Image (cartoon, grey):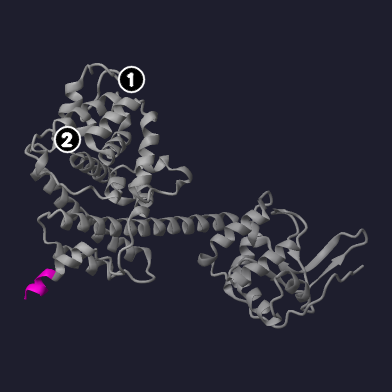
Amino acid sequence: MDTHISTTPFGRRPMTLGMISSQVAAKAMPADLTVHKWHIFQTIKEARGALGATDRALAILDALLSFHPETALYGDSELIVWPSNEQLIGRANGMPPSTLRRHLTVLVECGLIIRRDSPNGKRYARKGQGGEIEQAYGFDISPIVARAAEFKELAEVVRAEKKAYRVVKERLTICRRDIVKMIDAGIEEGVPANWGRIQQAYQAIVGKIPRTAPRQVLEAIAAELEELWAEVREALESFVKTKNMSANESHIERHIQNSKPDSKSESESGLGNKDEAGANVADTDNVRSLPKRELPLGIVLDACPNMLWLVKGGGGIRNWREFLAAAEVARPTMGISPSAWEEARTAMGEQQAAITIAAIYQRQDQINSAGGYLRSLTDRAKAGKFSVWPMVMALLRAKLDASKAAGNGAEAAAVDLETAGKVVRTESRLEISDALRRSLDKPRRGS
């Protein structure tokens, strides 16, 4: 008994090698192979660019899969569906018949489906006496099962490429923000460097960034920016070291690293290793020679990104008031008593004390007694022998060294720096700071 479920003429269509290849893959499919049709459809969507499939074609494939009654597709089962064009149009968001035919051809050419033509070129199924389908003509979706592993591999490649592209975009954003901030700080502090040349080099690099570009092009540009970033950072660090009467670089880097009093609890009355904790913080009596300008909030957050963990809702720290509030949260978590905190605020000033808390919080895993350490710094501040500049620069140097050691540059710090970068004020379109603009205008006014 022949029962025609639906009929739609195929018309004359040429056979291609791609179609033959899909048929061969379907025939070689293991009988025990099983896939979840919607899971594999999601994988195909991710790999659609590599497969050459269009969004419209995938909408039709989605509709075709919905005509198969089972969610699990087995290698040894009948995987032919025979909907009419009207039924497909209804389930494919009502696209025109000409569009439907064109994108069905795309699915065939991509090897996602196979046409199973009937003798008269129509789609239908023939049922036997018991109601079972004996023969069906329509669209064979067995390539979905046969090529499932291939689709997963393609999707993995696509995901990896998207991740690599996102990472290099983050590197570009981080470098651009950091360089602009550092140039601004360098000019404001009178750091000896050819800032005009540096700014011109920066603009020449960022001017090469196209609106759309392959990842490899962005990788090369990011590498150039990172070289400039290192040059500017070195200029700032050299300036701080020059101002420090001690020529030993470790005197800066050990400010926090080497402070390890014996007890993990705060010693309020006599630190066992007070000299060790305090002597390495600002190993110079020439604090007056260090920069008098307040540290920019953006640079402090670059050096102490862990403070951003303390902000409710992850909204970032946009001003000094929010930074001080975060310091108030950090203090009790490190076991610093209210009296030690109040004494530090009195000796250093509220903002400087908060920066000190942030630096201690950034390295709290290397400090046994945060409260005792803060008291030691407070004593030095009372004697006029303490500045937060060397402490912050030491943290920035540690971050740079860690990135170099990891061998992946900005990627290692992308998440923290991306968050910290939110606090940086928006520059002009060419990202020239006001300070730099004034510096570049001076020669013209004098000419």
Residue 134 image point, x, y percent: 84, 63
Residue bounds of the magenta highlight: 442-447
Element assignment for label 1: loop
The quadrant of the picture occupied by the C terminus is: bottom left
Q: Is residue 19 left or right of residue 312?
A: right
Q: Amino acid at mark 2?
A: Phe
> From the viewer's perspective, is residue 248 above or below residue 123?
above
Q: Is residue 446 above or below residue 278?
A: below
Q: Position of residue 207 (x, y in %)?
A: 27, 71
Location of residue 97 by image quarter:
bottom right
The percent coordinates of residue 40 (x first, y second) are 62, 56
Residue, disc 2: 386
Q: Is residue 146 visible?
A: no
Quarter residue 380 falls in: top left
Q: Which mark is residue 265?
A: 1
Q: Quadrant of the N terminus?
A: bottom right
Question: Residue at horizontal 38%, vertical 40%?
Answer: 326
Q: Amino acid at mark 1?
A: Ser
